[in-house]
Image (spheres, rainbow, N blue to C red):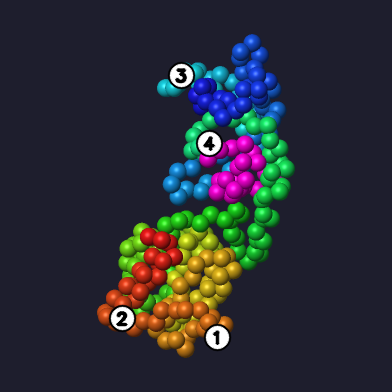
Amino acid sequence: MPLSRSFEHTKDSIIEEFKVNSEIDFQALIGLPALFLKETFGNEDPVARVGRIIHAGVYGRGIYGTDISLEYVYDPSIPPVKNSKLKEFASELGIDDFEFRRTHWAIKNNDLFKALLRNIQPRRQLPKVFRIEDPEHVEPTLASAMMPFHLGFDSVYESIKKASSEVYLHCRRADDIWENPEIIQDIVSLIDHSRVIICDCTGRNPNVFYEIGIAHTLGREVILITQNEEDIPFDLRHLRFIKYLNNDQGLSDLEQRLESKLRDLVGA
């Protein structure tokens, strides 16, 4: 990192505490707890970590002048926290909005751990049958389709993908993925990362019903579709759903109605 970016957004009174003969006292600085953030742009929402710097010093010349080198470790006992969550109490940490968008090394006269303890929600309850990320990571342009793996639903899936693409979402199905030995893990990971899940209840497939329950439990937006309204489980009849016919005209109508619903959900 450029040496010139040290002490940006830092009060003059603090800077003087960490200088000796106008030079940065790196040994004094590395004794402080550190909050490591990734620059945020657009819809990105990276996670920040708490840790400590174990070495810092002048490294050499870079394109922006003299560089410094940092070596650091994260504290495994403190869970990651999303930048969006940090912004909610950034004023308690003395961090302004611009600091989330620029690489620099600032020193704050604020109690990091007290602010984290007061503002960070408890970690999500983790299941035992499959794994979910902690903290959660939702991909803002990802949608997923939960439906029977049957040739008769391939044209339906194509319509779902077309509707998704119209609102700049990329739709995937579990059989598009092979990242884990267990298919249930691929399915759950896809649901957990998705912004919206479209679930086809046609045929009362028990796997689809299970996946609907997972999606609802994880707090995802769920759109129910079906060829037969009697296939919607009794416990879900109070929710709105899209009924469609599995023919050319019916799938065209499904595509239009899905696009409208998705547009409402994602604001595209």
Cα distance in 3D space between marks 2 and 1? 25 Å
Cα distance in 3D space between marks 3 and 1? 67 Å
Say what amino acid the circle numbered 3 marks.
Answer: Gly
Give the mark nearest the N terminus, 3 or 4.
3
The residue carrying pointer 2 sits among few (fewer than 14), some (14 to 19) or many (20 or more) residues within 10 Å by Cα, namely: some
Is 164 magenta? The answer is no
Residue at horizontal 61%, vertical 54%? 134
Marks 3 and 1 in Cβ contact (< 8 Å): no
Q: Secondary structure at mark 4?
A: helix
- For the record, the magenta segment spans 76-97
Q: Is residue 70 visible?
A: no
Residue 253 x %, y %: 31, 77
Marks 3 and 4 in Cβ contact (< 8 Å): no
Give the mark nearest the N terminus, 2 or 4.
4
The residue pinned by badge 2 equals 250
The residue carrying pointer 1 sits among few (fewer than 14), some (14 to 19) or many (20 or more) residues within 10 Å by Cα, namely: few
Give the mark nearest the N terminus, 3 or 1.
3
Give the mark nearest the N terminus, 2 or 3.
3
- Total labels drawn: 4
The residue pinned by badge 4 equals 99
Q: Residue furthest top?
A: 21
Q: Which mark is residue 234?
A: 1
Q: Nearer the viewer, mark 1 or mark 4?
A: 4
Give the mark nearest the N terminus, 1 or 4.
4
